[in-house]
Image (cartoon, rainbow, N blue to C red):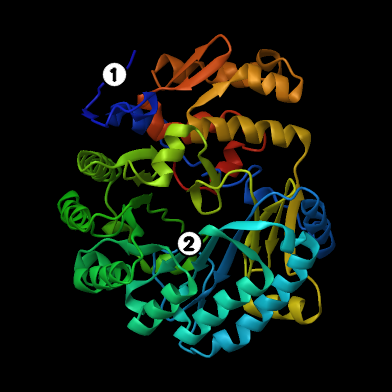
């Protein structure tokens, strides 16, 4: 029996995935625990160091025969200051000449990968630059980076080209360079607009600065925009966050990402700068989450899953409705059935059934590239069992429905027998109204959409109570 429902968040009922979502604080408290975000399966902590440059080269060669479309990710690791909430791989520097050194290493990596991928015969349907801060690079370097990509890869006419933008680090010249290079989607880092919160996390940016950059891109024809928000930051309150949400809604971005701040000072030593006494309580965080979901869906945004929202006409919402949604290392994505090839420090590729991660420091990356090898430091090739569990988890995470017969046909298994222990472990979630287990299917019910990570965790063969502490909390 479902207990203690506080509020029903109304969604446009265009199909069964766009139903009202109950927000039950008691249920969320019950299931809030550390767990993977499932941007990969197996997840990155299980990549092994016996997978290196030669193994990655083999994966690229295997990918060439598939002729699947490509997605490209480029990691620009540089920032001139560190945000204390950050969990990304960054190199702090004020030296803007880094690009002149870093870009040739990227091109060497691209040259080697493109040759093995048979890139000339394959279309690239998505390009994403992340960081760090891509706009750390001067305008001429941004133009050079896109020209480099176009030299080695064949971009589809409708290729999605997205760039993560720090509004504190984006000039008119940079906007002009990015738009001229073909950028058509931007992702703005915002987190919170309250000055006290910004000061506590070492990221001070005004609303005028932020919306000035958004409007600058819109004036240049870039109409698709995402804004990143974060709840659970030091000194954050429901009232402050409500003001930020109201300001964001007024600016009407196409997508929003609403992240739960993961305070993990043992993993990210710079977070020790944050006073834990200034962090909001678990109950306060739930209030912020509830108000955020209510505000955003009330403003017409569709809850995609986990922490993503989009306007009904956005491709992400359409992929949800059409059940073509997928996940990759950037979160929910519309680019299913592609091989993801990643470049730069710490970047992770997913090609030909395997994962390959690059080294995490600029010096190690330079050494590998200048030695004529890929900078791979770890990875893995999925086993048949990994593939099976990947598909189960992705169906639950992306489509909120699992067709057991389809899985049985694909893998030649008896689903209830193969996953007897997993189905038994899901019984309490079914009793609590998060899911429905019926003959031949599992449905994630509206109450379970916010807790879908918990549903997926039941099928994770690698997850143990000890390993779970490596991850952020599920809500």
User: Disc 1 marks which residue?
Assistant: 3
Q: Position of residue 448 (x, y in %)?
A: 40, 27
Which residue is found at the position 74% from the left and 32% from the top? 385
- Where residue 52 sits, quadrant-wise, is bottom right
Question: Who is closer to the viewer here, 30 or 474?
Answer: 474
In the image, residue 149 above or below residue 312: below
Question: Who is closer to the viewer here, 374 or 64?
Answer: 64
Q: Residues within 10 Å of mark 2 (few under 14, many from 20)?
A: some
Which residue is found at the position 61% from the left and 29% from the top? 392
- Where residue 166 sits, quadrant-wise, is bottom left
Q: Residue furthest top?
A: 439
User: Disc 2 marks which residue?
Assistant: 87
Q: Earlier in the sequence, mark 2 or mark 1?
A: 1
In the image, residue 349 above or below residue 43: below
Question: Who is closer to the viewer here, 113 or 204?
Answer: 113
Marks 2 and 1: CB-CB under 8 Å?
no
Which residue is found at the position 80% from the left and 72% from the top? 373
In the image, residue 14 above or below residue 139: above
Q: What secondary structure is marked by label 2?
A: loop
**Horizontal placement of 118 versus 305: left or right?**
right
Q: Residues within 10 Å of mark 1 (few under 14, many from 20)?
A: few
The Cα–Cα distance between marks 2 and 1, rounded to whole angstroms, is 35 Å
Which residue is found at the position 37% from the left and 46% from the top? 314
Q: Position of residue 61 (x, y in %)?
A: 82, 57
Residue 159 seen in render: yes
Q: What secondary structure is marked by label 1?
A: loop
The tag on residue 443 is none
Quadrant in which the C terminus appears: top left
**Horizontal placement of 226 versus 442: left or right?**
left
Residue 138 seen in render: no
In the image, residue 334 above or below residue 263: above
Tally the marks: 2
């Amino acid at each position: 029996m479902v207990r203690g429902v506080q509020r029903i968040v109304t969604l446009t009922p265009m199909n069964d995935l766009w139903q009202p979502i109950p927000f039950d604080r008691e249920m969320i408290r019950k299931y809030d625990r550390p767990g993977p975000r499932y941007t990969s399966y197996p997840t990155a902590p299980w990549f092994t160091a016996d997978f290196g440059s030669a193994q990655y080269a083999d994966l690229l060669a295997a990918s060439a025969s598939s002729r699947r479309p490509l997605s490209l990710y480029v990691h620009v690791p540089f920032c001139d200051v560190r945000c204390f909430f950050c969990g990304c791989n960054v190199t702090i520097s004020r030296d803007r000449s880094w690009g002149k050194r870093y870009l040739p290493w990227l091109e060497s990596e691209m040259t080697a990968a493109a040759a093995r991928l048979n890139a000339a015969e394959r279309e690239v349907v998505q390009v994403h630059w992340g960081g760090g801060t891509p706009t750390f690079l001067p305008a001429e370097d941004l133009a050079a980076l896109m020209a480099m990509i176009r030299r080695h890869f064949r971009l589809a006419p409708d290729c999605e080209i997205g760039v993560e933008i720090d509004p504190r680090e984006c000039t008119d010249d940079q906007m002009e360079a990015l738009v001229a290079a073909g950028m058509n989607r931007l992702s703005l880092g915002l987190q919170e607009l309250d000055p006290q919160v910004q000061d506590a996390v070492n990221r001070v940016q005004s609303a005028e600065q932020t919306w000035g950059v958004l409007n600058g891109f819109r004036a240049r024809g870039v109409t698709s925009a995402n804004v990143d928000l974060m709840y659970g930051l030091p000194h954050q309150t429901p009232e402050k966050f409500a003001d930020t949400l109201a300001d964001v809604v007024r600016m009407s971005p196409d997508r929003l990402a609403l992240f739960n701040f993961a305070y993990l000072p043992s993993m990210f030593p710079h977070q020790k700068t944050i006073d834990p006494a200034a962090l909001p309580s678990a109950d306060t965080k739930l209030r912020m989450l509830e108000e955020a979901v209510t505000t955003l869906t009330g403003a017409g945004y569709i809850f995609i899953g986990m922490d993503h929202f989009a306007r009904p006409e956005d491709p992400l919402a359409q992929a949800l409705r059409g059940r073509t949604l997928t996940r990759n290392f950037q979160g929910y994505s519309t680019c299913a059935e592609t091989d993801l090839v990643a470049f730069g420090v710490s970047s992770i590729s997913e090609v030909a059934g395997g994962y390959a991660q690059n080294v995490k420091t600029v010096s190690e990356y330079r050494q590998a590239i200048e030695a004529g090898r890929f900078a791979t430091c770890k990875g893995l090739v999925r086993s048949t069992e990994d593939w099976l569990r990947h598909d189960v988890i992705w169906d639950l995470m992306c489509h909120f429905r699992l067709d057991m017969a389809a899985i049985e046909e694909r893998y030649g298994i008896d689903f209830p027998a193969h996953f007897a222990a997993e189905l038994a472990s899901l019984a309490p979630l079914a009793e609590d109204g998060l899911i429905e287990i019926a003959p031949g299917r599992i449905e994630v019910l509206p109450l379970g959409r916010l807790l879908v990570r918990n549903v997926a965790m039941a099928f994770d063969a690698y997850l143990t109570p000890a390993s779970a502490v490596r991850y952020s909390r599920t809500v």
